[in-house]
Image (cartoon, helix red, strand yellow):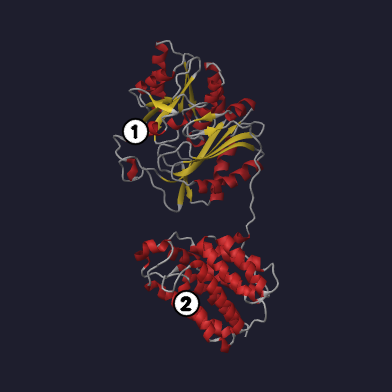
Amino acid sequence: MTLLGSAETFKRDWVDGFVTAYGREVRKVPDAYGVVAADTPRQDKVAVIIGGGCGHYPAFAGLVGHGLADGAVVGDVFTSPSAEQVYRTAREADGGAGVLFGYGNYQGDVLHFGLAARRLAAEGIDSRTILVTDDVASGPAEDPASRRGVAGDFFVFKVAGAAAERGDDLDGVHAAAVKANARTRTFGAAFGGCTLPGATEPLFTVADTDMELGLGIHGEPGVRTVGRLAATELADELVDGLLPELPSGDGRIAVLLNGLGRTKYEEMFVTYKRIHERLTAAGLDPVHIEVGEFVTSLDMAGVSLSAMVLDDELAELYAAPCSSPGYRSDGRPAAPVRPSITVDDALAAPQAAGESTVDRALTAALRLIEENEDTLGRLDAVAADGDHGLGMTRGMRAAVAAARTCENPAEQLLAAGTAFADAAGGASGALYGVLLAETGAGLRGDITAETLADAVDSAVQAFTALGKAQPGDKTMLDAIEPFRATLRTHTGSGIADAWRKAAQAATAAAQETADLLPGKGRAARLAERSKGHADPGATSFALLVTAVGDVLGGQN
């Protein structure tokens, strides 16, 4: 990770940048690597001080603010802050009602926060400590005190901050935090290790075919290696690791699917869909749900699943409003969450082709596109985003499904074009959609080789008007135009023979696009990269019309 910079200055530089960016909400502790809320200290309010090594943002400094922590101490990457830094940060935040220290159960943190607590006691400042121990993979259930603190830190800090905000005394804030910790469990998985500032290699690697279950947040690998799982399979592993560990309650839980630094939010949402299904099937009611990055591990690829079993007090505290750079909540009351279930015809593989010629032709085209999906994706990735194969498959599946709702060829192709454009999206979706729909519009009477050629001519005109491409721009048009011209030339030989010859011309023209440089779309910005590679749109068009030609030829 080149942006991490020097290992020696990383802590200094990121803290300075953080305080500069969020100076309206936090300020730096003088002569210390710590931050406190801008309005700290607040008289007669318990000061909640959290902390640990850096590399976990938004934990810990990002969780400083109204209704959360009053201050956070920052250590070097994955390293406890020193007792001196803890002491200075606590003194800066103390408002006379005592200090609650909260941190993960790691030896360095225990020693240094403990030393700072002793020093505060010598000066007459009372303190309490909550060690977060939510990681089920790091110790046996019968010895929870041996477990580490991972993403469950967030739940415990949120509850402690809310208790302090409502005016609880030090013992009350501590009791709420202890309850939150006792009712919180976490289980995680990693797909790849993290890289420390200044390092060139990750702390550990995971094979492309594997993943690690039960990982920590300090660059440790997991406790068990398994084969790489799909999103739903991973969701099952996470839930199966958590459910047996959850304490009893009335069913209400707060849930956190936490990203460890490199996993994309979209990937986490895909995984959470299945997690929610499993949790509700187990009789649980996720009334608070968070999906995002809360306790990271630099650039580690992976996720963890945390759950806190709620009672009335914890539900009230967790729902309380808060505001910090890393997390905000408006305090709206929790309400049951109904899972979102979308039925998408573009995702359903059609059954065997029906009796109509259009149905059999579109189904054959779909099959050939599916067989070549990876090839089309690789061609598209040369100078674009690599999604052409997937888009074509989605579009054709939707086109087949839509066409089956209609009776005659014109209506079938019109419906197919509309559905293709909707399902595939992007430029290709719109352009293929207009080709199908406009061809259908031209086939409202008797279908002959001449009327078919006329319909294709009209469709290509609409295509050109919409796409603005010219022959030689290395687009679909470079295969479409030879197809159109050849079909027109051979109308005298009948539909099947004319279409077959036109498909052959399109296939040859698509292959020849490898010698062209793109002049349209995003590929034009990376024109030299595409030299020697056929255009993906021209290639998919050639595949589509070839499959249709095979069906038409089989009718004779």
Q: In front: 296, or 407?
A: 407
Q: Quadrant of residue 111?
A: top left
Vertical side of 44 occupied by 137: above or below: below
The residue under the point 63% across, 60% down is 345
Dot 1 alpha-carbon crowd within 10 angstroms: few under 14, some 14 to 19, many 20 or more: some
**388 up-or-down from 160: above or below:** below
Query: Would you say residue 520 is visible in this rendering?
Result: yes
Marked residue nearer the N-terminal end (2 or 1): 1
Of the pair 411 and 400, the residue shown nearer to us: 411
Disc number placed over residue 11 in the picture, else none? 1
Residue 249: % across, % down = 65, 31
Can you give x and y, in whole percent of width and height, for residue 400 in the image? 62, 67
In what element is the residue under mark 2? Answer: helix
Give, as a three-letter code, the residue at label 2: Thr
Q: Is residue 530 left or right of residue 133?
A: left
332 displayed left or right of 158: right
- Check residue 467 in the rendering and tell me which mark sits there, or answer none: none
Mark 2 lies on residue: 507
Q: Secondary structure at mark 1?
A: helix
- Image quarter where the N terminus lies is top left
Q: How many marks?
A: 2
Q: Relative to 266, does residue 350 appear above or below in the rendering?
A: below
* Residue placed most toward the observer, 225 or 47: 47
- The three-letter amino acid code for the residue at tag 1 is Lys
**Rendered position, 200 above or below 183:** below
